Amino acid sequence: MVFQDRIAAMVLLLATLVVVVLMMLALFSVAPIFTSCLFGLLYCLYYFIANESSSAMHHAQEFENRFWTLFAVLLASASLFVPDSPVPMVCLSANCKLIIVVIVGYGVH
């Protein structure tokens, strides 16, 4: 009984993984530049969370605040300035976009 539950959980996990990979490939075919930026940020986030116990980054709250502020600013910059971003802000000028990025960085900090 326990063995069958374990097999069912593994099959569900494999199916979820296949769906996630296919969604990532579909997103990459639609918006390659934004997806590359997003994957880079997600890799940095994974590395930050995976090394929580051994990294010097987690020794002070201020270091973590700096990381999250930088992460939010980079994500906002990628969302607003990358041409194939799913957040179309074509009508805004570059100065307005820069002000939005600064507000996001200030809000997260």
Image (cartoon, grey):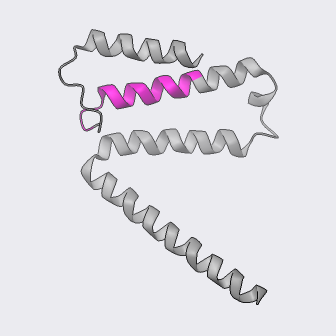
Q: For this rendering, which residue is in front, 97 or 56?
A: 97
In the picture shown, does residue 40 fall above or below 24? above
Q: For this rendering, which residue is in front, 19 or 51?
A: 19
Task: Give the x, y percent position of residue 17.
Answer: 51, 67
Instruction: Look at the image and say whether residue 75 sits in the magenta stretch.
Output: yes
In the picture shown, does residue 36 fall above or below 17? above
In the picture shown, does residue 49 fall above or below 8? above
Q: Residue furthest left?
A: 91
Left or right side of 79 for 108: right
Task: Give the x, y percent position of residue 3.
Answer: 75, 88
Disc count in the image?
0
Residue at image x 50%, y 74%? 15
Q: What is the quadrant of residue 34 in the picture?
A: top left
Specify the quadrant that holds the N terminus. Answer: bottom right
Residue at image x 69%, y 42%? 49
Instruction: Look at the image and say whether residue 54 sits in the magenta stretch.
Output: no
Highlighted magenta segment, given as a residue range: 69-84
Q: What is the quadrant of residue 92 in the picture?
A: top left
Residue at image x 59%, y 40%? 45
Task: Give the x, y percent position of residue 52.
Answer: 76, 39
Specify the quadrant that holds the C terminus. Answer: top right
Magenta stretch: dominant secondary structure: helix
